[in-house]
């Protein structure tokens, strides 16, 4: 009776500082990917495919070393990791095309529909309840995202903004599906940090390769500068970022993970100002501020609840016998709750 009661009052680990730090670091690295993709000068399928293949040069030996230390992941976990890679590849392809159609600002912002899609997927698939703060913050977050993306008073755009917005939304849904599956694999295999990322990258590479072959093809004769940017994109955006994000999402609730990842579009706007000399409007800067404030409110640590099995402090009593009799009862009720 004690263990179920304790599980109801003790949240998973939505505010583990190490998980939050890892996720924010991964989002910061990921914010550079849009700039690196633009610098490569490659088409979406080519950039997405080589991003994955080059990352496997690092991930495969790392995963083999992990295999020697901890053994293999289960067959089911490997299958789910590969499936998550299909969704990740779809996200890469859709998002890159959305950048070309609607502009990088709009594409980065619309992609973050995952902040709602991730907890919604968790609710539909596993019945994980969405927190009231997430539901209340959703319209505010969406408003901030739209402002940061430049939908009001901004000159940013592309040749096909409507199609770009639709593709960006689909990319965000695929991205949320990847995050959810990657989180499940990481939680069930906590000792395997790199293997799920490596398997997901294989799935993404196959997906991007098939789409590229079915379209205009995958380019091999790229300039040296393009290869250099692709290598940096693979190492930063595919290895470092996703290892950190995989570690972070395994240690927190899906809604919190989705909210914290909203720092990605905000940092993208700031990096665009510094690196690409972009000049966001006042509306965009206001949206960035609104996103940051709302994310901080959603991700604020909740006050930990007292375990149900913990005995209340004993009232002062006048006899030593009463004090001695109270201590064993507190010990007996506390130990099962903490060990459960």
Image (cartoon, rainbow, N blue to C red):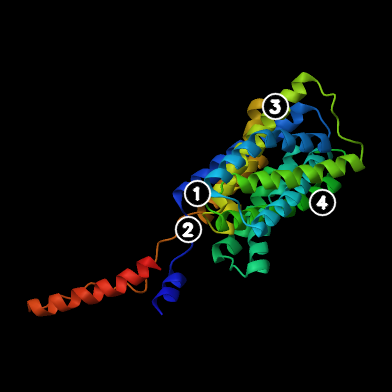
Q: Residues within 10 Å of mark 3 (few under 14, many from 20)?
A: few
Residue under pointer 4: 166
Which residue shows up at 73% across the image and 44% down it? 202
Residue 113 at least partly seen: no
Residue under pointer 1: 19
Which residue shows up at 64% across the image and 63% down it? 122
Q: Pointer 2 and pointer 1: residues touching (CB < 8 Å)?
A: yes
Q: Nearer the viewer, residue 187 or 287?
A: 187
Q: Secondary structure at mark 4?
A: helix
Residue 121 appears in which quarter of the rendering? Answer: bottom right
Disc 2 to disc 1, how far (Cα)? Answer: 9 Å
Q: Residues within 10 Å of mark 1 (few under 14, many from 20)?
A: many
Which mark's residue is nearer the viewer, 4 or 1?
Answer: 1
Which residue shows up at 74% across the image and 47% down it? 203
Q: Pointer 4 and pointer 1: residues touching (CB < 8 Å)?
A: no
Tell me which numbered mark, 3 or 1, is placed earlier along the sequence. 1
Residue under pointer 2: 13
Tell me which numbered mark, 4 or 3, is placed earlier along the sequence. 4
Q: Secondary structure at mark 3?
A: loop
Residue under pointer 3: 276
Residue 292 at what x, y percent from top left?
Answer: 56, 46
- Horizontal relation, residue 273 to residue 45: left or right: left
Residue 198 appears in which quarter of the rendering? Answer: top right
Q: Nearer the viewer, residue 149 or 188?
A: 188
Tell me which numbered mark, 4 or 2, is placed earlier along the sequence. 2
Up-down: is 281 above or below 295?
above
Tell me which numbered mark, 2 or 3, is placed earlier along the sequence. 2
Q: Residues within 10 Å of mark 2 (few under 14, many from 20)?
A: few
Which mark's residue is nearer the viewer, 4 or 2?
Answer: 2
Disc 3 to disc 1, how far (Cα)? Answer: 31 Å
Which mark's residue is nearer the viewer, 2 or 3?
Answer: 2
């Amino acid at each position: 009776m004690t263990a179920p009661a304790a599980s109801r009052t003790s949240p998973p680990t939505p505010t583990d500082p190490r998980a939050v730090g890892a996720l924010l670091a991964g989002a910061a690295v990921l914010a550079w990917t849009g700039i690196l993709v633009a610098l490569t000068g490659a088409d979406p399928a080519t950039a997405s495919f080589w991003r994955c293949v080059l990352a496997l040069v690092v991930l495969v030996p790392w995963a083999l070393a992990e295999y020697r230390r901890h053994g293999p992941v289960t067959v089911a976990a490997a299958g789910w990791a590969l499936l998550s890679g299909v969704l990740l590849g779809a996200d890469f392809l859709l998002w890159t095309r959305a950048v070309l159609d609607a502009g990088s600002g709009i594409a980065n912002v619309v992609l973050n529909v995952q902040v709602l899609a991730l907890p919604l997927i968790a609710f539909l698939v596993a019945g994980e309840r969405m927190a009231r703060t997430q539901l209340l913050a959703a319209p505010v977050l969406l408003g901030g995202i739209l402002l940061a993306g430049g939908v009001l008073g901004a000159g940013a755009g592309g040749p096909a903004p409507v199609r770009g917005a639709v593709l960006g939304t689909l990319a965000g849904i695929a991205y949320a599906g990847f995050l959810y599956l990657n989180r499940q694999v990481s939680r069930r295999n906590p000792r395997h940090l790199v293997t799920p990322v490596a398997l997901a990258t294989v799935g993404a590479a196959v997906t991007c390769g098939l789409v590229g072959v079915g379209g205009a093809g995958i380019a091999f004769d790229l300039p040296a500068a393009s290869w250099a940017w692709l290598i940096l994109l693979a190492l930063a955006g595919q290895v470092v970022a996703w290892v950190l994000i995989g570690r972070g999402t395994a240690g927190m609730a899906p809604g919190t993970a989705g909210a914290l990842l909203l720092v990605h579009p905000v940092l993208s706007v700031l990096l665009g100002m510094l690196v690409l000399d972009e000049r966001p409007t006042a509306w965009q800067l206001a949206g960035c501020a609104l996103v940051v404030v709302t994310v901080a409110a959603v991700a604020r640590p909740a006050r930990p609840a007292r375990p149900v099995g913990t005995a209340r402090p004993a009232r002062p009593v006048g006899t030593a016998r009463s004090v001695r009799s109270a201590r064993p009862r507190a010990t007996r009720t506390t130990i099962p709750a903490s060990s459960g």
